Image: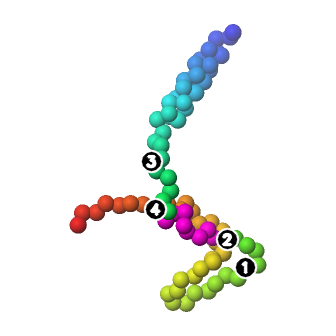
Amino acid sequence: MPFFLIPLLINLIIGIALQALGYLLMPKSKSEKTDEVTDMDSPTAEGGRPIPVVFGEIEVTGVNIVWFGDKATTTRKIKA
């Protein structure tokens, strides 16, 4: 085996070991999604569906949205 392959293999083994270590040390999720998150209506993306124009303050239901983001809740502790 030529001498230039030995450092390459050593670096490859170290890289794979560090990837495995990073995966094992990755933080795990603490809980499942709450009912509030799973109860939200999923937005739809359909062609030909009208886009509502809102003037003022109103609740729009059945919106045609392409991307909504992650459905999640955040609990914050405040001093009162």
Determine the secondary structure under disc 2: loop
Q: Looking at the image, tell me whether mark 1 or mark 2 is earlier in sequence order.
A: 2
Give the residue at mark 3.
30
Q: Are marks 3 and 4 in contact (CB under 8 Å)?
A: no
**What residue is shown with label 2?**
44
Distance (Cα) linking label 1 and label 2: 10 Å
Sequence-wise, the earlier of marks 1 and 4 is 1
Question: For the residues marked 1 and 4, what is the alpha-carbon distance in whole angstroms?
Answer: 29 Å
Whether 34 is among the magenta residues is no
Which residue appears at 54% of the width and 67% of the height?
39
Q: Amino acid at mark 3?
A: Lys
Q: Nearer the viewer, residue 40 or 9?
A: 40
**Nearer to us: label 3 or label 1:** 3
Residue 73, disc: 4
* Magenta highlight on residue 38: yes
Disc 4 on helix, strand or loop? loop
Which quadrant of the figure contains the C terminus? bottom left
Q: Is residue 16 above or below residue 3?
A: below
Q: Are marks 3 and 2 in contact (CB under 8 Å)?
A: no
Alpha carbon of mark 3 to alpha carbon of mark 4: how far?
13 Å
Range drawn in magenta: 36-44
- In primary-sequence order, the first of circles 3 and 4 is 3
Instruction: Give percent across and percent down for residue 11.
Output: 57, 23
